[in-house]
Amino acid sequence: MTLTEKTFQAGDITLSYDEGDGNGAPMILLHGLTGMRQAWQVNFIPTYGSTWREYAIDLRGHGKSSHARDERHYRIGDYVEDIVSFIKRELDDRPVVVGHSLGAMTAIGVGAALGDGARGVILLDPPLAARELPVSVFPGASWWFNWVYNTISTGPTYEQVVEACRATNPEASDQMLKGMATQIHSLSPGTVKTALDNRIAENFDFGEALDTITCPVLLMYGEFGQSGATRDEDAAFVREHARKLTTVKLPYDDHGFHETHWDETQPHVTAFLEAV
């Protein structure tokens, strides 16, 4: 399949995205905090690119999308506003919205805003504890966000970021280090600072948003721990509020199970997509 790089103006934010050439209904793909749209090329795009028209978007402050003028504007509501604007102005059919981590929390807001205009919502390991607890409850993410912020907050060159990545991952290949550095160097420091300041869920009511979603929802998560970001009580919270919910728990403490355990993830995603 072919991906075409495009841009979209959402207020003062320029979103960069890849559009697939599939002939099916639209699928919006939203990456996690510090991620990039290219992450979806591992599994989702090769698997569903011919049967869905996929739109993999760099969230504001990430990848090739522009940075917010005010570095405090990296909250869930800010991301939601961008994506809803894109969907309403660019698409002529109801999308399925797929999100991982921060993208999953954003997908909740997008699904709520679209109402009957959404076909389905897929939530991959949303860190919903952030709605009530500090980022320190996520040990792996807390360390990572601090490291990223300390690495990029002084405005380093790309080469300096490569060396910082090398110091942290001395066994990594040059190709891996350059990929990691590209991802990190493009970030706005405000993206991780907002998370570290425990402001990412500020002024956003997840219960109200989940109550408002009318389309089917698939929640997939693993074991909460060093990597996994969804607690059992967070899944119970989603069950309490979502009307048409399918929940799948995988036996892994792995925030990226949709990449590392695709053989177990894919059947549930495919069954959900075939039903919406």
Image (cartoon, rainbow, N blue to C red):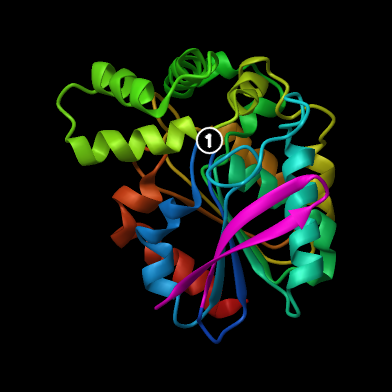
Residue with the mark numbered 1: 230
Q: Is residue 260 visible?
A: yes
Compared with residue 38, is residue 173 higher up or lower down, i.e. above or below?
A: above
Residue 23 locus on image (x, y percent)? 55, 87
In this view, the residue in front, 104 or 19, is: 19
The C terminus appears in which quarter of the rendering?
Answer: bottom right
> What range is drawn magenta here?
1-20
Compared with residue 156, is residue 200 higher up or lower down, i.e. above or below?
A: below
- Residue at image coords 49%, 41%: 35
In this view, the residue in front, 96 or 268, is: 96
Q: Amino acid at mark 1?
A: Thr
Residue 216 locus on image (x, y percent)? 68, 66
Relative to 131, 263 lies left or right: left
Relative to 207, 144 lies left or right: left
Residue 262 picture quarter: bottom left
Residue 15 lies within the magenta run: yes
Q: Is residue 253 visible?
A: no
